[in-house]
Amino acid sequence: MNTPFDPHALLSRRFAPIEHAYAIRDTQLYALGVGLGADPLDPQQLDYLYEGVDGRSLRAMPTLANVLAYPGFWAREADTGIDWRKIVHAEQEIVLHASLPPGGCVVGQNRVSALWDKGPGKGALMQQQREVRDAADGALLATVTQLSLLRGNGGFGPGGGNSAPPVPHALPDRAPDVVHDIRSLPQAALIYRLSGDLNPLHADPAIARAAGFERPILHGMATMGFAAHAVLAAVLGYDATRFAGMRVRFTAPALPGDTLRTEMWVDGKVVSLRTTALERGVMVLGNSRVDLH
């Protein structure tokens, strides 16, 4: 029997630290999963895929932070009281405090940082935050924040959060400064899932149909990775050291094989963006941004 939903219990829920050792092959596989290597002769793309003859040349994609020390789909556990079948991933944000090493060992500490009630029948917003630290010296590498809509858990009243929910990032009211297209592979979701998100929705056609999709969909965080790739390619010359953070709002699922068109507005150290599945004319990321050093 499931435990009744208790916002105070969620806010005080204890998560065990997660130690995650990863190798350069994991970093390379992640980069393949978000579209790097489409041009195998491009040395800038190879920086994220090829370790070089000295074994020390590899760079990590900034959005690799999303999969490091990932706590998994813990909301499915019976003692949470969460109606996990009605969860929607609404936003994802990363803040980088240092460049991610291409291989090593990290420790992640997760917590539920806020809950906001939208009202009976309207659901609730749950924010969780994870700090990712170097296991050797404790240095903070990244802070990862995830916002989820709990469609089946509204109506608990005030007391779940001390602040207002995050306001969507506003896109500029002008034509985009840069547009960049990346064609995702038909097997993109099957590649990306090997970086740690094994939800069968992204691999099993029968489960995807049962969830109301015509076919397995691309992971939301993979779509985020494709958009980060577009910013690196079109704005930063593949220089990840200038990438300070990213926040995206998920608006619709992307499908493996979609051409993902990212429109970008560059204003100083902020790159505003939205991403559209070009062939279907569906916006998959909206009101999103990348922060630069």
Image (cartoon, rainbow, N blue to C red):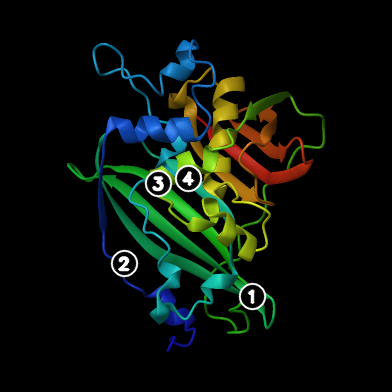
Quarter-wise, where is residue 212 in the image?
A: bottom right
At label 4, the amino acid type is Ile
* Residue located at (68% from left, 32% from top): 259
- Residue at mark 3: 67
Image mark for residue 123: 1
Distance between the alpha carbons at the discs numbered 4 and 1: 25 Å
At label 3, the amino acid type is Val
Q: Considering depth in this image, is 155 or 70 the residue closer to the camera?
A: 70
Q: Considering the numbered disc 3 on the image, is that residue within a helix, a strand or a loop?
A: helix
* Image coords of residue 148 (percent x, y): 56, 63
Image mark for residue 15: 2
* Image coords of residue 237 (percent x, y): 54, 17
Judge left or right: residue 219 versus residue 62: right
Whether 276 is drawn above or below 90: the answer is above
* Residue located at (21% from left, 45% from top): 135
Q: Earlier in the sequence, mark 3 or mark 4?
A: 3
- Residue at mark 4: 94
